[in-house]
């Protein structure tokens, strides 16, 4: 069954990208982080703020900042004063959804230049941002049980391991790879050389999840500039095209689902692939930035993205397939496990990475073989939403 | 493919002060079922879904988690706009114009009755470092703006009181409204001041409800029983800082209306638009928004309300539904209720609140204190 009515006729290009440092307890406010990333994105492509037609903001729960209608509060930092402004929101999936939201603005023909900003400042949530996640659960059925985010993800990881006979050291390799990749990323927060042994020796947070399998608490911002086809060529001779977008939300009743496989990521990917004309993802995708807030999630998502067989992503990882120099480089940026996880900003950071990889501007992180097409993906809500963007040079 | 977009389905749950017997999911399910039936479709035919909600109104972080099931949207493209109802419709319009969707459902709901103190929630929308320490209450911010607007546009207290009288009375004829009543200007002027010059009865009272609007491409609209066309849509935000706003003029409304008029090709709004559903969260806002939307010149809105120009039977009916003052205020769902009311007018199905010769209507929204964000939409029968 087709997942979209018809192929969009208006093409949308990414023409600029900007990224702040990812760190714990940044001195900058959320507005300032947004300003930093947004101005960098604009400056690198030579677009002036006054020429921007509309602005998209992505930022995760208001509870982090304790600010109601957080999008309204952040808007001047993102350059949206006196402009059409939209805060689209799908929990942790918001970072990659932000380019989808920006894509809609241009693909609809309403705007020619759109600034997309993603911001997160988690460290203002005291004593720990996990506290904000206590309030994401169903008020009647779940909250009385006092669950937190780490518990439910440990359930999912355990289910994934039990279904396919995966061992924890298979999963620990994701942390090793991504933290190593991040050493080459100038914005990275938790880049380091570690071994599988180090990961498994780290404290158990909620079994089977160890401390070094969890991304850190971060502050940061990312931004991109999107342009219509007729305007893009005025600013760059190296546009990166948004070839496909897809998103999918599963039921709120996560307890009724088989957590071994993210079917919502599969549907989101199939929608994006259909739009991009991808029929053989493993051949036609050259670099991938799947969402890795927990080590197992990268593997889980590679399977949902149809880039590995079900239950086989750990094996592929062990054989080096997902290394930066491997057959399908996965998280060459260092991902959330290495660069950091300011939630919405982390998703858009993955889009920025594809922009730089496809233009051959990723420096020490550059994957070999002049990649022509990449996929970024994020995930969020109650292990429930998949957001996918396909970017390419054609 | 054409860029024309229509509204083909409206599902409204009547607003009520309490909704103890039903959860937000049940309210939304009812709205969705009504909207799909109105459009002559099933949930399976909807290509994409947009919900409009804010975490602190729901008491749940990442509240978009709880949107899909009751819309029939499980495992489908669903996203949330943390914004105004018209921003949700704008997202739907963009999805349709991109070509990837023919039918998009936009949902918003409100359980204001679950909130112990909405004023305290709104106070958390102020900047924590610069604005909150002043301990200004949200209604007082509106009162400051009201005072400035009255000064700028020479609006007497009686004109603002008449907005309340008109909207509450019109709501008596609207079965969806929760707060219809027959009151006099003296009742309004003698109601207790909340923050001078703002009085209790000049603040729209809360109500619970849910609404779903189905937006369609031209192809899909041609198959629908009763399409109403979205001729233009606009939205805008001005500075969130209290210290950096014009106070007297609703700049966001002017920007949004201009964008919507440009898209609709409207050059003479008062002549080309036959009625309006304008935000009246506070009574003075109806007058301020009439001027900002270039429907009345400065100071004219006050004369209009005093001489009955904007009554349901007048030459330019404003808020024939009863507005928020008469229907009830329901956060970001408000704009979708007003959209529903405007669609019914243009279909000639507004019953006892029907205005004569309704051919083109304006819906204009505001996100409330302390924001300077709003939207505008021009709807046409043809």
Image: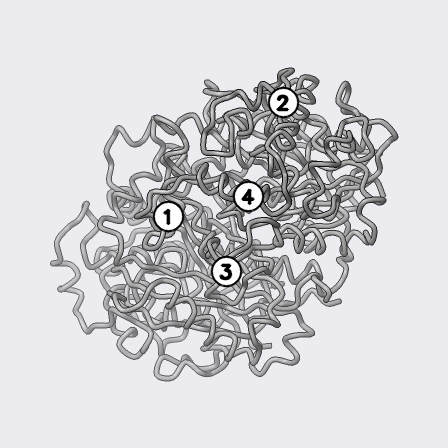
Q: Is residue B376 above or below residue B361?
A: above
In this orientation, which residue lies closer to the viewer: A337 or B274? Answer: A337
Q: Is residue A17 left or right of residue A366?
A: left
Q: Quadrant of residue B46?
A: bottom right
Chain holding disc 4? A
Residue identifier under label 3: B68
Subunit ID for the residue under disc 1: B
* Total residue callouts: 4
Which chain's residue wears label 3?
B
Q: Is residue B45 visible?
A: yes
Which mark identifies residue A163? Answer: none
Mark pair 2, 3: CA separation: 39 Å
- On screen, B374 above or below A358? below
Q: In the image, which is nearer the foreground, mark 2 or mark 1? A: 2
Residues under numbered marks 2 and 4 in contact, where contact means CB atoms less than 8 Å apart: no
Residue plotted at (41% across, 43% down):
A69
- Mark 2 vs mark 1: tell me if same chain: no
Would you name the residue on which mark 2 appears?
Answer: A196
Which tag is nearer the camera, tag 2 or tag 3?
2
> Distance of mark 2 from mark 4, alpha carbons?
49 Å
Labelled pair 3, 4 in contact (Cβ < 8 Å): no
Q: CA distance from mark 2 to mark 1?
A: 37 Å
Residue found at x 47% / y 23%: A203
Quadrant (top left/top right/bottom left/bottom right) for the N terminus of chain A: bottom right
SS class of the residue under badge 4?
A: loop
- Please, which residue is most extreme toward the front here? A165
Residue corresponding to mark 4: A83
Left or right: A248 in relation to B290: right
- Answer yes or no: are tags 3 and 4 on the same subunit: no
Q: Please tell me which of labels 1 and 3 falls first in the chain.
A: 1
């Amino acid at each position: 069954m087709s997942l979209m009515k018809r192929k969009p006729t208006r093409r949308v290009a990414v023409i600029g990208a900007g990224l702040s440092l990812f760190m714990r307890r940044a001195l900058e406010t959320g507005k300032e982080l947004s300003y930093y990333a947004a101005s960098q994105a604009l400056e690198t492509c030579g677009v002036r703020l006054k020429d921007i037609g509309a602005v998209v903001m992505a930022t995760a729960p208001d509870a982090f900042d304790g600010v109601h209608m957080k999008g309204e509060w952040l808007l001047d930092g993102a350059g949206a004063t006196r402009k059409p402004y939209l805060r689209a929101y799908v929990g942790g999936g918001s970072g990659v959804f932000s380019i989808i939201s920006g894509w809609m603005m241009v693909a609809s023909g309403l705007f020619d230049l759109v600034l997309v900003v993603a911001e997160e400042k988690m460290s203002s949530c005291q004593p720990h941002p996990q506290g904000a996640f206590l309030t994401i659960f169903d008020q009647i059925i779940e909250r009385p049980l006092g669950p937190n985010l780490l518990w439910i993800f440990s359930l999912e990881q355990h289910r994934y391991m039990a279904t396919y006979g995966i061992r924890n050291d298979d999963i620990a390799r994701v942390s090793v790879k991504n933290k190593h990749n991040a050493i080459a990323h100038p914005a990275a927060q938790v880049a380091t050389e570690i071994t599988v042994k180090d990961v498994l020796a780290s404290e158990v947070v909620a079994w089977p999840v160890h401390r070094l399998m969890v991304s850190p608490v971060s502050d940061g911002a990312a931004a991109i500039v999107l342009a219509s086809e007729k305007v893009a060529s005025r600013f760059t001779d190296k546009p990166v095209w948004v070839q496909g977008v897809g998103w999918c939300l599963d039921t709120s009743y996560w307890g009724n689902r088989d957590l071994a496989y993210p079917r919502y990521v599969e549907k989101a990917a199939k929608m994006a692939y259909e739009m991009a004309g991808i029929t053989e993802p493993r051949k036609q995708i050259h670099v991938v930035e799947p969402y890795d807030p927990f080590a197992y999630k990268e593997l889980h998502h590679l399977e949902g993205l149809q880039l590995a067989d079900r239950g086989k992503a750990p094996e592929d990882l062990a054989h080096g397939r997902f290394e930066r120099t491997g057959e399908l480089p996965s998280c060459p940026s260092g991902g959330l496990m290495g660069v950091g996880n300011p939630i919405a900003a982390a998703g858009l950071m993955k889009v920025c990475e594809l922009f730089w990889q496809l233009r051959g501007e990723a420096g020490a992180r550059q994957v070999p073989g002049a990649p022509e097409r990449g996929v970024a993906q994020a995930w969020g809500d109650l292990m429930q939403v998949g957001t996918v963007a396909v970017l390419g040079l054609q | 493919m054409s860029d024309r977009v229509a509204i083909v389905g409206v599902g409204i749950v009547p607003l009520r002060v309490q909704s103890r017997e039903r959860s937000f999911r049940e309210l939304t399910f009812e709205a969705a079922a009504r909207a799909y039936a109105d459009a002559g479709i099933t949930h399976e035919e909807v290509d994409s879904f947009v919900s409009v909600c804010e975490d602190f109104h729901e008491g749940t972080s990442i509240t978009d988690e709880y949107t899909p099931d009751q819309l029939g949207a499980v495992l489908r493209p669903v996203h949330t706009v943390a914004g105004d109802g018209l921003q949700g419709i704008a997202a739907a319009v963009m999805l349709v114009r991109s070509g990837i969707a023919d039918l998009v459902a936009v949902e918003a709901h409100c359980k204001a009755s679950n909130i112990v103190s909405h004023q305290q929630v709104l106070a958390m929308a102020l900047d924590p470092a610069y604005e909150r320490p002043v301990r200004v209450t949200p209604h007082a911010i509106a009162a400051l703006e009201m005072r400035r607007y009255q000064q700028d546009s020479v609006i007497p207290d009686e004109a603002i009181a008449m907005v309340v009288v008109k909207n509450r009375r019109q709501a008596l004829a609207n079965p969806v409204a929760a707060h219809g009543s027959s009151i006099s200007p003296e009742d309004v002027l003698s109601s207790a001041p909340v923050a001078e010059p703002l009085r209790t009865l000049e603040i729209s009272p809360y109500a619970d409800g849910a609404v779903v609007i189905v937006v369609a491409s031209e192809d899909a609209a041609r198959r629908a029983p009763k399409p109403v066309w979205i001729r233009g849509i606009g939205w805008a935000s001005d500075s969130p800082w209290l210290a950096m706003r014009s106070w007297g003029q609703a700049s966001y409304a002017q920007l949004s209306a201009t964008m919507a008029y440009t898209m609709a090709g409207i050059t003479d709004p008062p002549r080309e638009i036959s009625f309006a559903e304008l935000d009246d969260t506070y009574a003075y806002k109806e007058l301020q928004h009439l001027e900002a939307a270039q429907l009345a010149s400065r100071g004219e809105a006050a004369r209009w309300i005093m001489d009955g120009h904007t009554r349901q039977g007048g030459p330019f009916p404003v808020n024939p539904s009863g507005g928020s003052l008469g229907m009830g205020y329901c956060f970001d769902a408000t704009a979708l209720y007003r959209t529903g009311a405007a669609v019914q007018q243009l279909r000639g199905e507004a019953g006892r609140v029907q205005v004569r010769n309704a051919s083109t209507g304006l819906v204009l929204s505001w996100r409330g204190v302390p924001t300077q964000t709003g939207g505008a939409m021009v709807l046409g029968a043809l």
